[in-house]
Amino acid sequence: MESPLKSLLSDGDRYHKGYQLLLERSNKLQRMQHFLNHLLPDIMSSTINGKSQLNVIGFGSGSGELDLEMMSALHLKNPNMMVDYEVVEPVAQQISKYKELASQTPGLDYIKWNWNNMTVQEFEKDWKEKERTKKFDFIHMFEMLYFVKDRGATVSFCQSLLNKDGKLFISLLAGNSGWSKLDKTYGDRFREPEVSVVVIDDIKQYLDSKGVSYQRYLLPSQMDITECFIEGNEEGELLIDFLTEVLNFKKSAPPEIKAGVLELLHHPDCSVVQSNGKIMLKNDCEIIVVEQLS
């Protein structure tokens, strides 16, 4: 039976507010920033290896903060290298914010920007129709495969775009995260069919089936969801909307589903209750890196 619950994706403004709140309530962003600044340059060193230009694609780059952070980290170690950057982002508002951020950030004259306001599927279709043959050294898909139907095909397309020694970075929730347990338990009751909290294990399984080797990097993370359990708390309601991908979840979900979701989120399998009473959702993320060897 079709769910009567409305997808949070139908309200783009509330979705992005929820995402910003998630970043504020968790240490995931700090974990990612540490990875980009301290690990990324060394991981990419064998790919760069004296190159005068790095060809990059960022899929689902959002408003660009992480993109600029990773480019800054690479530029610091390779100051003479130019960058040709394909930004692929389906939300026009996010592209506008990215452009504004790039224009206001000094010292980016080493980057040539190519803006693509489209989904990864639209980018692939356009790329093939134009019979483009350009290859890339660095492709990243951070937290964006949730919105892709055929993830294996998308990963395969990205692999086909890599230069020899080029690297593909994919980040997703770890399989043991509380968020993934929530989706496995209740996702089919309230989530849109085309959206699911796919976990990194699904991508590993695909790569293993194709005999593709990869490196793994775990980013332990927790998110404060205490406010989700406070009746009438606006930020708590926004957070639980984002976790369930349901618009106005607490107001629209049937009582039994609402109670079940809150009970599961409080369960030790999903969250840790600290001595100060804060409820911290296990929100580990994992990055896998695929290298093109030939």
Image (spheres, rainbow, N blue to C red):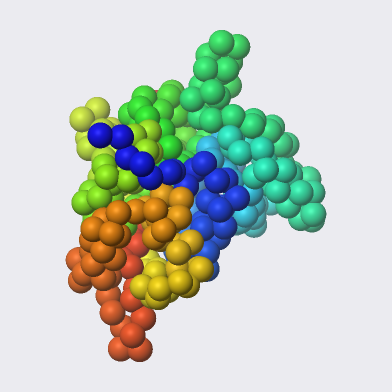
- Quarter of the image where the C terminus is located: top left
Q: Position of residue 146 (x, y in %)?
A: 40, 41
Above or below, comparing residue 91 to residue 182 in the picture: above
- Quarter of the image where the N terminus is located: top left
Q: Position of residue 21 (x, y in %)?
A: 52, 64
At horizontal 64% and vertical 30% (from top left) the residue drawn is: 116
Using residue 225 as the reference point, say whether residue 66 is left or right of it.
Answer: right
Using residue 120 as the reference point, say whether residue 294 is left or right of it.
Answer: left
Above or below, comparing residue 139 to residue 72 in the picture: above
Above or below, comparing residue 67 to residue 157 in the picture: below
Residue 257 seen in the current view: yes
Residue 78 seen in the current view: no
Who is closer to the viewer here, 104 or 260?
260
Using residue 65 as the reference point, say whether residue 226 is left or right of it.
Answer: left
At horizontal 60% and vertical 11% (from top left) the residue drawn is: 130
Who is closer to the viewer here, 192 or 287?
192
Who is closer to the viewer here, 119 or 73?
119
Q: Position of residue 266 (x, y in %)?
A: 26, 70
Task: Specify the quadrant of the image occupied by residue 169.
Answer: top left
